[in-house]
Amino acid sequence: MTDKKTNNWSRRQVLKAGVASSAAIGAPMFFSRNTWAADFRNNPGNSKNLVLGFNVPQTGAYADEGADELRAFKLAVKHLNGEGDGGMLNTMKPSVLKGNGVLGKKVTFVTGDTQTKSDAARSSAKRMIEKEGALMISGGSSSGVAIAVQSLAQEMGIIFMAGLTHSNDTTGKDKRRYGFRHFFNAKMSGAALGPVLKKEMGTDRNAYHLTADYTWGWTQEESIKETTEALGWKTLKAVKTPVGAGDFSQYITPILNSGADTLILNHYGKDMINSLTQAVQFGLRDKQVNGKQFEIIVPLYSRLMAQGAGKNLQGILGTTNWNWALKDAGSQAFVKSFGQEYGFPPSQAAHTCYVQTLLYANACETAGTFYPPEVIKTLEGFEFDGMGNGPTEYRAEDHQCFKDVLVMRGNMKPTSQFDLLEIVQQVPRKQVEYDAKIFGGELGPYVV
Amino acid sequence: MKNEKILKSNNIPLYMVIFSVVVLTMPLWLEPIGAAYPDLLQKFAIFGIFAVGFNILFGLTGYLSFGHATFLGVGSYTAVWSFKLLTMNVLPAIIFSMVLAGIFALLIGYISLRRSGIYFSILTLAFAQMSYNLAYSVLTPITNGETGLQLSKNDPRVVDGLFVEVGQGIPSTNLFGLEMSGYQGFYFCAVLLIIAFYISLKIFNSPFGLNLRAIKSNQTRMSYTGYNTKPYLLAAFVISGMFAGLAGGLLAVTDPLAGAERMQWTASGEVVLMTILGGVGTLLGPLLGVGIIKYLENIFSSIGVKELGDFFSFVPDSMHAFVVDFSSLFVGEGWHLTLGLLFMIIVIFLPGGIMQGFDKIKNLMSKKDKE
């Protein structure tokens, strides 16, 4: 098997190859030329439209939340452009929004599917930024994804208004200058739940955690542990479960004989629906352990989950960022226009996404420019009211919003299919505030 | 399977020049179909390398590995760690990615290649699933589990610390100062794709490649003639693992984040789909497969009812709603359905992939010429 090489390059071929390859190598100069023409990425310039990118999970364990977020985004865009009844535009204080778009430009949007995967989320965010010219990215529904997209936003110099993300890390150790979060976090959930747990369950309990195995689960477990252990509770065991596991029976069986009298479910979305339903089916809630009634706690609640879990949720304690039953003018205006549009009340995920879009638009309008560093400076330390949570502040040190937190209980006698959670207590903002330094992390530069 | 050389040796330079020009001008000719933006272009080039490497194993030896995403993941994690510990320069990162992926391939290959056919596939699948679970939940200190491994400002970056002043934010990946995001990133990946393609072409044309093809056609006969086939197979496995490692490293270069989902079995399945769709054992087929799948994934999945409505505006009003509703099944979230249908059609009518389709067309043309 001989393989004789006849590698004869004629001079003509060499010349041709040379010309072709130099043309090819020169191509980058040609294509990247325009990258520096704009003073910041995706500057709308003289365009009549402003493009926002909404990146939500449309498939996977958090798809229900994602669908509701998208509804809220669409509603927010309508209101910003002066269509519909204006919703919270009328109640937001202070506000310079007039319902004629933002800085005279009509608001348009593009969407992407995060698939609840960091890779896919960054990929679709990049598509919206690089191809469709999105000036701001919003969305999320998983803290892992939110953190991944937030750091991408910092690299690309595009503002990220986080949607549903509850992990301490989002505005803690992984905070970024270009990332903002209106939603509350695990630390605040713990602080709000503490006194209620003490009153309802006493100071002598043995807790067993089931925790979703990613950043949100980890930090929520940590924060809830911190709270309960300060009350005097013991933590027997904390078991990590994969996200989207579907079947949790292998994790629930060991609880029966562990001596625990309290189960804390650090799960969300379909995971929480499944694990709670199975825990109830295994008879955990009918058990008496150490002479005490067995209790289940779901630190982060949502109405969408309540709909999925049905009766199993009745009487169980948890916290939410917002609930449609709130009576303030802002909440009512939002619930009314959302209801008119879609025929049912919004979830807390929808609320936070709607508010974030309005806050971004208002900051651009106030700053008088879309230039991100100026918009960021306007948002930092911004104090507002009339958005459903009472007086709220975007803390400048970590871009976290501080506002009241709701402690909720699964409604024992629901009057409608949406009236599934009742408000136990509206915990004032003061009680859930903490020092921005405890989580470390750095925001990074304004100009990238 | 034709047992002849795919290309005559003296045609190679011309072939490579054409190939290079086509790859490097992708931003131009992909513009009309909306695929010319840096992220997707980078993906085309990176998964191109992945598929070209996979084709060296699957196309030449016929050994179907269902675990190639493992090497992709290993490459990504290695590259990110190199960014964290040593330097933001991409050269060490991709070299380490290839080396480590090669070591993994050697271990997994050594064990898996004791079996052939379906048993080999199952073994590689088992290894891939094991690696995925390790990355996802066991080795979280190294991989950061579901959240994914990311850079942070406090990383040591020992080598960079000696030469460069620490900036305000997280530094970006670079090639001696040239930033590796956007179009620069694409051209870097594209040049590596051209090199990878050249290596694969050389392998296809070499005696080594001929040996591999002989193994595919009849391994038993090969052993009877006195050939020890295993070293050849292992070499092919390791080479293709290193290609995958390079692709994984490049994923981290263009976007410094590594997540466990990159190692999931679906990712391994994807490269099999790409190769079969384009044409197993052909040089260009896998690249065509990559183009089609990545295009569907990124562009088709972003088309909504509104875009469809505009697109079908020529349809009469009475039919309009129906046409839009029906076609919306195949775009957006439904892009998997489109991919599935396309895959079925190709496997049923063109088992040799799109490349076979081209051959058929070529044959038809030449027949016509003769008449």
Image: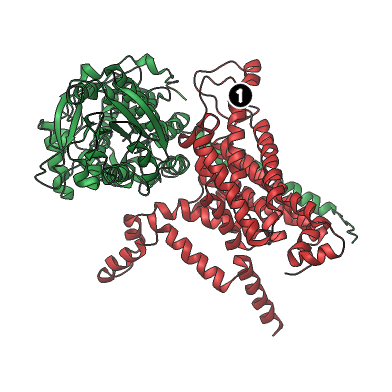
Give left or right: position of A123 versus A316: right
Q: Is residue B227 left or right of residue A158?
A: right
The outermost residue toward the front is A291
- Residue type at mark 1 is Leu
Q: Is residue B358 left or right of residue A70?
A: right
Up-down: is A92 above or below B320?
above
| Left or right of residue B157, residue B103 in this image | right
Q: Image quadrant of residue B119?
A: bottom right
Label 1: chain letter = B
Say which element carries label 1: helix
Please say whether residue A200 is visible from this viewpoint. yes
Q: Name above or below for residue A2 compared with residue B261.
A: below
Q: Nearer the viewer, residue B58 or B189?
A: B58
Point 9% across, 32% down: residue: A327
Neighbour class for label 1 at 10 Å: few (<14), some, many (≥20)?
some
Residue highlighted by disc 1: B85
Where residue A215 appears, as percent x and y from the top left, is 41, 31
Q: Nearer the viewer, residue A102 or A394?
A: A394
**Chain shaded red:** B
| Res A411 quadrant in image | top left
At 40% from the left and 29% from the top, the residue drawn is: A218
Specify the chain shown as green: A
Instruction: Provide residue A376's location: percent of width, then percent of height.
Output: 35, 24
